[in-house]
Image (tube, coloured by chain):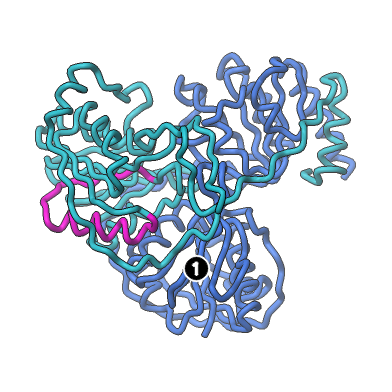
Chain colours: A blue, B cyan
Amino acid sequence: MSIFVYVEDWNGAYKKSSFEAVSYARIWANSLNTSVTALTSSVVSNPSVLGEYGADQVLTFEIAKTGFGLAQQLQALIQNASGVVISGTNFGKSVAPAFTALSSGALSSNTTSTPITISPLTVKRGAFSSKGIETIELSSEMPIICFVPNSIGVQEFPTACTVTETQAEGNDLLSVEEITIASGKIALPEADVVVSAGRGLKGPEHWGMIEALADVLGAATACSKPVSDIGWRPHNEHVGQTGIQVNPNLYIAIGISGAIQHLAGVSASKTIVVVNTDPEAPFFKAADYGIVGDAFQVVPKLVDTLRAFKADQ
Amino acid sequence: MNTLVCISHVPDTTAKINFTSDGHSLDATGVQFVINPYDEFGLTKALHLKESLGGTITVLNVGGPETEPTLRKALAIGADQAVRIDAIPSDAITVAQNIKNHISANSYDLIICGQESIDYNGQQVPAMIAALLQLPFTNACVGLDLSGSEATTKAEIDGGHATFKATLPMVIGGKKGIVEEKDLRIPNMRGIMSARSKPLKIEMAVEGVAPTKAVSFDKPVVKTAVRMIDPENVEELVRLLHEEAKAI
């Protein structure tokens, strides 16, 4: 028996959520006293690095391009599983339910905890747009966990690890025409720090200071819904209920009032800083630290202070 | 062009969420229910397609009788007929199985779901329907163009976008972008009147054993009061973020 984990790569490179998935599998496997088998793309040049996070063996194969195709491959490759872990990236969210349907498994998506009890298996997951936390029980021979990136954290479990090449059939039911990745940008769902701005910035030409703040913090940039609706910033930066949900360690909101739709996408953040001219802005109620002040004065000062702080580190 | 739009009946975004005293389920007292916001974008896309290509829009919900006003609202917005599969939607795969059975017994060119519902935030059902039927699927779909039976879809992926081509029928997990916010329609009086006479069919559910079960619901821990910092003293903020929050 083994806990299987699909480890996603981006053009052959791993990200934090890849290692986090292996850590998750290791924690689960330890509670069952079993091994961890990682499944990953054969284009990755150093799959044995997964041993550092707890993988006992790594199977590499030429992965399908779509969630369904990969789900079929996982179904072929996963034998004698005690459970399966998939990280809740955009791609993972297509793979996990398809695999669940094919394998007649039980899936907890949007999972935010490692197993709380093992028999029966229970975990916690986000529900009601962060206004509730569900404890869910999975009763199946094939329990599948799709977790929220950054909710567990990467943990090291140095393990002797073997790498084996294999293959599996998967049918992509559609063809991939084009992939466009915004270069040099940090993907929002897995960013450690997010700097987000709203209508308080008065116009798209003022985003330079937001990018400067993001740059000094190594953060992803985001925006509120009105800002993406009026076209100041692209839709894929919109965080909130109908946009992207984030849960970084630090979320800095500049000139965003904090409508409930926005809070639904960000309230899982560990620390929230709000800068707003309006002391009555509802966002202050959800914040850890607040500054009532003009973004045009506060942000440049904050950038300078952070640069000095980082230089001292 | 026969389109199926799957609709979830969910608490309004601004609703206060409370759970029953045993913690097993949502306390629906005083909660206003609406069409799931993600599904509204999908329904509007279906209306656009009908206006250019003709055909019929069916809206479907898996739920109890209390969800019918939400289906009637979808009819008032412009769907032609509604189907309610009579079951408590407690688990994604059982919901997907029931929708799959309905699709197999009918003939649809396109199945549009919202990417996720804002109540259970599962983001499971659309991919499960597609996998059960072995149909092409695009999740986080922010663009859909049809040319005959060929569909071009645009999806959000981590850090960018992807474009796919597929042959209909296919399943979409849609979100804002498939149509824009300003395209969303609210029912007018004529729509509301005509919705009353549009068919709303109730279908029996196939009971399956749900592999997942909600044990309990809790509310998130309430944040301690915000710590206000003088705008002249951002050094203090940096210090607190480093020493107290350990966030930088």
Observer-nearest of B246 and A195: B246
Percent position (x, y) of residue A202?
A: 59, 14
The relative height of residue A25 versus residue B101 in the rendered view (above or below) is below
Chain of the residue under the numbered disc 1 shown in the image: A
The question of residue B179 being in magenta is answered with: no
The relative height of residue B165 versus residue A71 in the rendered view (above or below) is above
- In the displayed orientation, state which residue is furthest to the front: B21
Kindly state the secondary structure of the residue where label 1 is placed: strand
- Residue drawn at the location 34% of the way across and 56% of the way down: B127
The mark tally for this picture is 1
Q: Report which residue position mark 1 lands on.
A: A6
> Which corner quadrant of the image does residue B194 belong to?
top left
Percent position (x, y) of residue A160?
A: 67, 83
Observer-nearest of B243 and B197: B197
The reply to whether residue A43 is visible in this rendering is no
The question of residue B112 being in magenta is answered with: yes
- Residue drawn at the location 60% of the way across and 35% of the way down: A221
The reply to whether residue B144 is visible in this rendering is yes
Q: Going by the image, does A293 lie left or right of A227? A: right
Specify the segment rendered in magenta: B90-115
Which quadrant would the C terminus of chain B be assigned to in this image?
top right
Q: Going by the image, does B147 lie left or right of A190? A: left
Which quadrant would the N terminus of chain B be assigned to in this image?
top left
> Which corner quadrant of the image does residue B239 belong to?
top right
Identify residue type, mark 1: Tyr
Percent position (x, y) of residue A274?
A: 71, 28
- Residue drawn at the location 65% of the way across and 78% of the way down: A30
